[in-house]
């Protein structure tokens, strides 16, 4: 029985070996046929595969196994290949690299400045790195060429690129730019606010010396300038504007991290509730409501809503309630929120009730106002399309990312002290009223009021009238923590500015706050060049460049853009930083406008084409702010390569200017 089983096992083993042998033979035939085809195409590069007979002790059958042989590269050819690889690696490491980390919904002039400062000084540029792109091996940059173009929009550049794509392909790092006020693009790019840390390192005597020789620009210093004024004084040379002019665009809201569904990749807002199911278009008659929220820290490791206050344009409270979060509170943050355990324990209102109340109170065309309102909407877990943000419309630091606190804005522009008590904390009613007063003040004095990026400065406060003031309403409707007051339907709310009265009280315009004072000093990129031992060349046709020419020998003013670019082209090889400030000619005729833009773009392309290898080329379009409408600009950049296609297409002389 055992012998029978052994015989069957041998048969099965022999059958398996025969199957393997058949596979080996098929594989060998396939290898030989491919080898013959290879020899027919490329000649005899190596001998055919040799086979070796191996005997199987079980079957006694010889099995042929393939034995590949590899071609040995000659020593000279191998060394030549290694030398080429070493040269390529060396060339790669000798070139700067610029690539885009993400495409932001909007970028500011401050973002462009950070790129330029980092290209000049690297890590020494106050520790700032551009957030929207990454620059590697900045030391290898041979030259920096920047061209700023006033009154040209991103749409106009895209229209030009359709017929002449060379410039767009070269400047492949790009992002939409916030529209700049006409005449201020060059200043916003060249000047930057001095940080608190940097200012503290400058002795007072040296600081005054730097101011006198132009190395440091003073926007305001409360130890040098003393101005007094009344609350809400009138600037006679500024005119009122529409509330529609202050509305934030969707792109700007996304940049400021507002909850916007179309730009919510980095924010979890799927559960957020809209303030209305449908919205009506806003108009000059759309009502404004100021919102302020207080938050406490909960066990969910985040700040959650504990109080909300809403006031109308008459500074009347229309909604004010405490809110109890579902998660247990771990820190009441009383110093900031004003909330205590005793206040919140009896409260029964929850977030969904607040959301329902807001949806009932607000009309479909309501405009919400607030100081950094994005945080309040996130705490409410709601979205709203029409927003005015006082931290955006008031800019005292020149850097859009450096916000001035509501406390400082109130002291400067309203001469009113808020948030004084650390024990009692902030009062959301007081903060929301202050926010509304600041918005009304901005509407009355104009778009540039309180915004240094639009040309406003603190010296203009001396021209404010001493006789008028904004009066707070004496009677404010009282609301309990659990009561939602009844208000007239939205169409019946009278829309008017608060009444005014005489007030002879005066107070310092700027509180003696070190951080605020530090933010009002600015320096120029020319100072960066001096520290980096770079030779700058500034040319332009704006009034800012003309004023700068009087104190800076590196600055040259010309009558038109043609003179700026033509002269720069002749002197480009002698400097490390070249900055050209030009202006696009405007015309009501669309075809003529396109022709003007094409001529200007070809001149700029020619300047970039003659730049040396490894140059950083940056083009900044200022956009257009006209009649309350903002058309975004554009910033695009690229590193010049030896085989740049821009060279051949831009060397020809551009057509003459049209009549």
Image: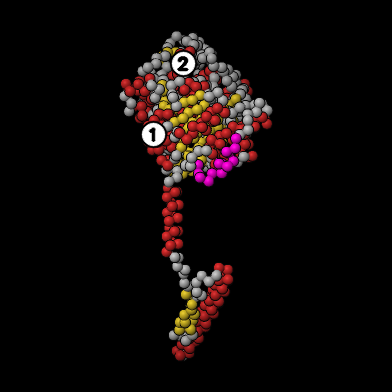
At numbered mark 2, what does the secondary structure look like: helix, strand or loop? helix
Q: How is the image coloured?
A: secondary structure
Q: Nearer the viewer, mark 2 or mark 1?
A: 1
> Within the image, what quadrant is residue 58 found in?
bottom left
Instruction: Find residue 323 and report its horizontal and vertical position in percent.
Output: 47, 32
Residue 297 is left or right of residue 100, and the answer is left
Main SS of the magenta part reads: loop
Residue, disc 2 = 461
Residue holding disc 1: 532
Nearer to the camera, 425 or 122: 122
**Residue 576 image offset from top left, x and y in percent:** 44, 34
Please tell me which residue is depicted at 38% across the width and 34% down the height of the picture. Answer: 532
Q: Residue 173 versus residue 199: which sits nearer the camera?
A: 173
Please say whether residue 485 is visible from this viewpoint. Answer: no
Q: Which residues fall within the magenta stretch?
A: 639-653
Asked whether the viewer can see residue 99, the reply is yes
In the image, is residue 649 part of the stretch drawn in magenta?
yes
For image coordinates 49% across by 9% down, the residue present is 467
Please tell me which residue lies in front, 419 or 13.
13
Give the position of the C terminus as an image quadrant: top right
Q: CA distance from mark 2 to mark 1?
A: 37 Å
Image position, residue 364 (x, y; %): 61, 29
Which residue occupies 53% across, 35% down?
607
In which image quadrant can residue 215 be found? Answer: top left
Question: Looking at this view, is 115 or 415 the one in front?
Answer: 115
**Residue 487: image x %, image y %?**
57, 23
Crowding around mark 1 (Cα neighbors within 10 Å: few <14, some 14 to 19, many 20+) is some
Q: Earlier in the sequence, mark 2 or mark 1?
A: 2
């Amino acid at each position: 029985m055992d012998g029978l089983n052994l015989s069957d096992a041998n048969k099965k083993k022999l059958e398996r070996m025969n199957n393997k042998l058949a596979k080996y033979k098929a594989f060998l035939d396939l290898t030989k046929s491919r080898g013959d085809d290879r020899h027919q195409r490329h000649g005899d590069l190596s001998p055919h595969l040799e086979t070796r007979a191996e005997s199987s002790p079980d079957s006694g059958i010889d099995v042929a196994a393939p034995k590949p042989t590899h071609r040995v590269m000659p020593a000279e050819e191998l060394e030549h290949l290694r030398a080429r690889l070493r040269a390529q690696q060396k060339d790669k490491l000798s070139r700067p690299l610029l690539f885009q980390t993400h495409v932001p919904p909007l970028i500011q002039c401050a973002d462009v400045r950070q790129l330029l400062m980092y290209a000049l000084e690297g890590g020494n540029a106050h520790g700032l790195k551009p957030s929207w792109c990454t620059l590697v091996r900045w030391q290898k940059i041979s030259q920096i060429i920047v061209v700023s173009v006033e009154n040209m929009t991103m749409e106009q550049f895209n229209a030009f690129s359709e017929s002449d794509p060379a410039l767009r392909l070269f400047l492949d790092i790009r992002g939409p730019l916030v529209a700049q006020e006409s005449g201020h693009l060059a200043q916003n790019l060249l000047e930057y606010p001095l940080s608190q840390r940097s200012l503290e390192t400058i002795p007072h005597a040296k600081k005054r010396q730097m101011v006198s020789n132009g190395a440091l620009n003073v926007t305001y210093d409360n130890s040098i300038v003393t101005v007094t004024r009344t609350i809400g004084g009138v600037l006679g040379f500024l005119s009122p504007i529409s509330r529609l002019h202050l509305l934030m665009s969707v792109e700007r809201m996304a940049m400021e991290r507002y909850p916007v569904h179309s730009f919510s990749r980095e924010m979890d807002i799927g559960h957020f509730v809209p303030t209305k199911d449908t919205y009506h278009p806003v108009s000059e008659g759309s009502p404004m409501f100021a919102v302020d929220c207080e938050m406490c820290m909960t066990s969910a490791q985040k700040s959650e809503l504990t109080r909300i206050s809403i006031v109308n344009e008459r500074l009347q409270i229309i909604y004010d309630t405490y809110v109890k979060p579902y998660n247990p509170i771990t820190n009441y943050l009383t110093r900031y929120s004003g909330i205590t355990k005793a206040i919140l324990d009896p409260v029964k209102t929850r977030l969904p009730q607040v959301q329902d109340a807001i949806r009932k109170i607000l009309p479909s065309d309501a405009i919400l106002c607030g100081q950094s309102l994005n945080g309040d909407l996130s705490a409410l877990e709601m979205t709203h399309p029409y927003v005015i943000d006082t931290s955006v419309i008031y800019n005292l630091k020149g850097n859009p990312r450096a916000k001035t606190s509501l406390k400082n804005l109130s002291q400067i522009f309203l001469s009113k002290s808020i948030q004084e008590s650390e024990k009692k904390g902030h009062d959301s009613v007081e903060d929301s009223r202050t926010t509304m007063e600041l918005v009304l003040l901005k509407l009355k004095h104009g778009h540039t009021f309180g915004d240094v990026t639009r040309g406003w400065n603190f010296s203009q406060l001396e021209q404010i009238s001493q006789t008028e003031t904004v009066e707070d309403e004496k009677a404010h409707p009282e609301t309990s923590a659990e009561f939602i007051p009844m208000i007239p339907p939205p169409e019946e709310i009278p829309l008017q500015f608060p009444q005014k009265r005489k007030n002879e009280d005066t107070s310092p315009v700027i509180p003696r706050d070190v951080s605020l004072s530090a933010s009002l000093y600015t320096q120029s990129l020319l100072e960066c060049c001096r520290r980096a031992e770079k030779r700058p060349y500034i040319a332009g046709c704006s009034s800012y460049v003309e004023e700068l020419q009087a104190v800076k020998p590196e600055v040259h003013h010309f009558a038109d853009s043609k003179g700026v670019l033509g002269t720069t082209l002749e002197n480009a090889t002698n400097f490390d930083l070249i900055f050209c400030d030009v202006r696009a000619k405007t015309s009501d005729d669309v075809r003529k406008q396109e022709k003007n833009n094409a001529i200007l773009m070809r001149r700029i392309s020619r300047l970039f084409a003659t730049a040396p290898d490894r140059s950083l080329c940056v083009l900044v379009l200022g956009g257009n702010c006209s009649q309350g409408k903002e058309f975004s600009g554009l910033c695009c950049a690229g590193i010049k390569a030896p085989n740049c296609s821009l060279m051949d297409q831009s060397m020809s002389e551009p057509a003459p200017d049209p009549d």
